[in-house]
Amino acid sequence: MNADINKLDQYIARHMKLWGIPAMRISFAVIFFWFGILKPFHLSAAEGLLKATVAWLPFGSAENWLMVIGWWEVVIGITFLFKSTTRIAIGLLFLQMVGTLMPLVFLPEVTFQNGNYLMPTLEGQYIIKNLLIISAALVVGGTYYRKEKGGNSGNAISK
């Protein structure tokens, strides 16, 4: 009985390994394309928060930033669809995430209840969940490395 359970567990684990990264890439594609395309058409629930976040920027209007960020997210989504452009998608995602986290710093009255940093508002929770997106992007990105000549893997830590 134990051997059968172990075989089943191994079977499931192999399929999880096989499909995990593609599933994350497709999930990223759907989420970024969907949420991004809503912004230029003024259909995003996050429009007010986004505009309030970029209002202090010395260049470009909040309206222009809404368009830029929306189309940026669409591009992130599209580039996650293809294995060959995943590195580009991850780079664009990390740049976008810097901006996404900004309301936690610049708009704490919107992202936290009564100034209590242990009690995020719905907007704050929406932003904080991006830590999971960042972590998942690290996992996906960690699977795309190139081997250097001589057999050493080409990662950020190697010489």
Image (tube, rainbow, N blue to C red):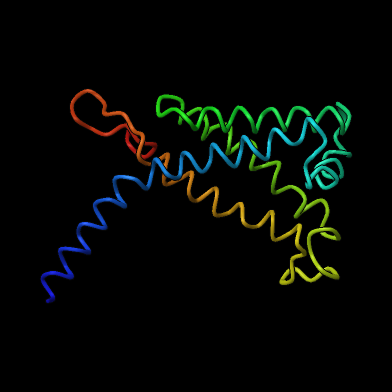
- Which image quarter is the C terminus in? top left
Left/right placement of residue 141 relative to residue 14 reads: right
Q: Residue at coordinates 79% horizontally, 64% vertically from top-left?
A: 112
- From the top left corner, tell me how far across and down residue 89 is, in percent: 52, 31
Q: Residue at coordinates 13% horizontally, 69% vertically from top-left?
A: 4
Q: Against 123, is 23 above or below?
A: above
- From the top left corner, tell me how far across and down residue 79 is, in percent: 52, 28
Q: Quadrant of residue 132?
A: bottom right
- Nearer to us in this view, 52 or 59: 52
- From the top left corner, tell me how far across and down residue 2 is, in percent: 13, 75
Q: Against 58, is 26 above or below?
A: below
Q: Residue at coordinates 78% horizontally, 30% vertically from top-left?
A: 40
Q: Quadrant of residue 77?
A: top right
- From the top left corner, tell me how far across and down residue 70 is, in percent: 72, 32
Q: Quadrant of residue 97?
A: top right
Question: How many numbered marks have been drawn onto this rendered protein structure?
Answer: 0
Left/right placement of residue 76 relative to residue 147 reads: right
Residue situated furthest bottom in the rendering = 1
Q: Residue at coordinates 77% horizontally, 64% vertically from top-left?
A: 121
Q: Against 75, is 32 above or below?
A: below
- Which image quarter is the N terminus in? bottom left
